[in-house]
Each structure stands twice: as C-alpha cells, then as structure tokens.
Amino acid sequence: MAKLHTLMISAACLLDADGRLLLVRKRGTSAFMLPGGKLEAGEDALAALCRELPEELGLTFARSAFTALGRFEAPAANEPDTCVRAEVFTGALDVPVSVAAELDAQRWLVRGEPWPDDLAPLLRLHVLPALWPSAATTRQDFHRQHADDARREAERLLAERAAWGSRWPAWVATQLYALSPAPYAAMVRRELERLAAE
C-alpha cells in the first residue's frame, strides 16, 4: 500500500499591473502552477518564498510585499502518491519576468477567461476560487475543469482496495471527507462508484 507523502510548500500569486496572474511550469512537466517551492528545515513560508523567487524568476521581494491568501492542500501535480500543503500569498509584480532554474515556461492567466486544462490541482481547486471569488464558475464549468482530477483521485482510491481489504470502505470515507471543496469530493465519490461497479 502506497503511503501518501505530504510536501510543505510556499507559493505566490504574482499579479501584474493589468491584474494578470503569473503561472510557471517546471522543466519536464506539463502542469502550470504558481511560483514558489518547498520549505527547507526550520524555514517559514515567507522565508521560503523570498528564497525561491530570486532562484526561479530573478525577483527579489521583502517579506512585507506579500499578503496571506490562505493555506490549502491538494494532490501534487507532478509527483505520484503525494499531496502539497501550501501557504499561498499575493503580491504585486511591476517588473518584467523571465523563468530560470528548474522552470522552463511562463504564462499569464487573465481573470474572467476560461481556465486552461493544464493547471495544477492546487491552483484549480483552491487558489483561483480564493483569489477571484467573484469569477465563480457555473456547475458545468466546475465539473469540466475538475473531471480529470476527480478520475485520477478515484483511480488512486480504487487501487488501494486490495491492500485495505474489509477496511477499505472506511478508509475511503476518511479520504473523501478530507477532500475539498465539497463539490469536488462528490465528483470523486461518483467516479469511484462508477469505477468500482465496472
């Protein structure tokens, strides 16, 4: 039975003068996400962010430049059996940006435009709804945006059935309870029921 590993990260919603959100992609991966990175031993979230942004984007920020957006947890975009627990901050970006270090692409996300399909789960499920709550999507849009994530999560849960044996239903219940937001958890449950019936 695979043990779910948790990565503690810090990430930044960097918004330019037009209100566009900067997204980045790591080399050798397909999902776009926020700039930032893993916390080192003894490091707090803002210290990690102030260390990572010069490495990734050549940008230097003071701790006071950021405002806390929230703490979120979601499946990792690029690592199996892993979730990310992120402290996310917002900050203003008033200089040109170019990616460096392990990053190989950047993109701007515009409020009100459809979300691309290649966004990391943390970004889609939690950060964008928290950052732009007035840009709430319809139920149909929500399902379209999260269908792939829900299917992958349901497949992960189903793959554990043999390992857990008779305790699997109770374990699944705890896993579903931990998912958020609630509509996403419901999507995973329905997908799991469909897969288990096949």
Image: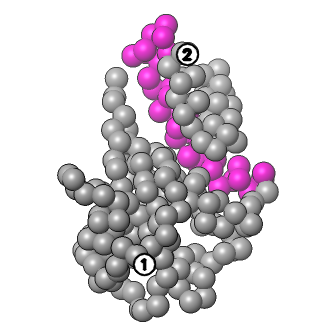
Q: Position of residue 66 (x, y in %)?
A: 44, 73
Q: Does the magenta stretch mainly form a helix, a strand or a loop?
A: helix
Residue 178 sits in quarter: top right
Q: Nearer the viewer, residue 11 or 78?
A: 11
Query: Of all residues shown, which one is farthest toward the front?
Result: 64
Which amino acid lies under the numbered mark 2 shown in the image of this protein? Pro
Q: Is residue 10 part of the magenta span, yes or no?
A: no
Q: Residue at x 28, y 78 (%)?
A: 54
| Residue range of the region highlighted in magenta in the rendering | 139-168
Q: Is residue 148 part of the magenta span, yes or no?
A: yes
Q: Which mark is residue 152?
A: none
Residue 160 sits in quarter: top left
Q: Nearer the viewer, residue 96 or 86?
A: 86
Q: Which residue is mark 2?
A: 169
Q: Which residue is mark 1?
A: 65
Q: Residue at x 63, y 37 (%)?
A: 185
